[in-house]
Image: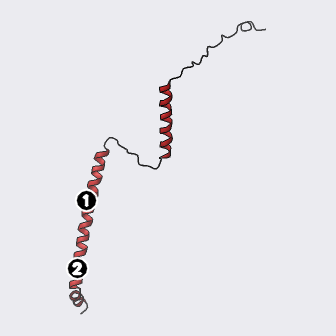
Amino acid sequence: MGLFTSGISKPRRFNHVPIYYDAEEEAHEERQRRISESDKAREGEYRPRLHRGSFHSDRRAAENKRKEMRRLALLLVVLVGVAIFLITNGSQLMSLYFE
């Protein structure tokens, strides 16, 4: 026999779940579900990523690539020139060293 809690019961909680149907909300949720499923199916596809500074960094990367291509082209021209020089004057150079 408890002195303080024996006769006191806790009040019942009000737990009412409203029954309400919104056709637009249902359609919106269905579209969201289809979009999320199609996104999961397209994991390997291209996704554009735009963020702050991306255009500037892309332009800088393109400039660096252009500079590298110029260096490679210049190196190729120099190597081709040396090869042509050696082909045309190679016999004279060989005769100087091995005489």
Residue shown at the point (28%, 46%) measured from the top left:
56
The answer to which of marks 2 and 1 sits earlier in the sequence is: 1
The residue that disc 1 covers is: 67
Residue 48 coordinates in the image, percent (x, y): 38, 45
Name the one closer to the observer, 43 or 61: 43
Name the one closer to the observer, 41 or 50: 41
Residue shown at the point (50%, 44%) measured from the top left:
40
Say which quadrant the N terminus sits in: top right
Name the one closer to the observer, 5 or 16: 16
In the picture, residue 91 is in which quadrant?
A: bottom left
Q: Is residue 27 left or right of residue 71?
A: right
Q: How is the image coloured?
A: secondary structure
Label 2: how many Cα within 10 Å (few below 14, some 14–19, many 20+): few
Residue 85 coordinates in the image, percent (x, y): 21, 80
Q: SS at mark 2? A: helix
Q: Give, as a three-letter code, the residue at label 2.
A: Ile
The residue that disc 2 covers is: 84
Q: SS at mark 1? A: helix
Label 1: how many Cα within 10 Å (few below 14, some 14–19, many 20+): few
Q: Give, as a three-letter code, the residue at label 1.
A: Lys
CA distance for labels 2 and 1 = 26 Å
Residue 22 coordinates in the image, percent (x, y): 50, 23
Point out the residue furthest to the right here.
1
Name the one closer to the observer, 74 or 22: 22
Depicted 33 relative to depicted 67: above or below = above
Q: Is residue 46 left or right of residue 74?
A: right
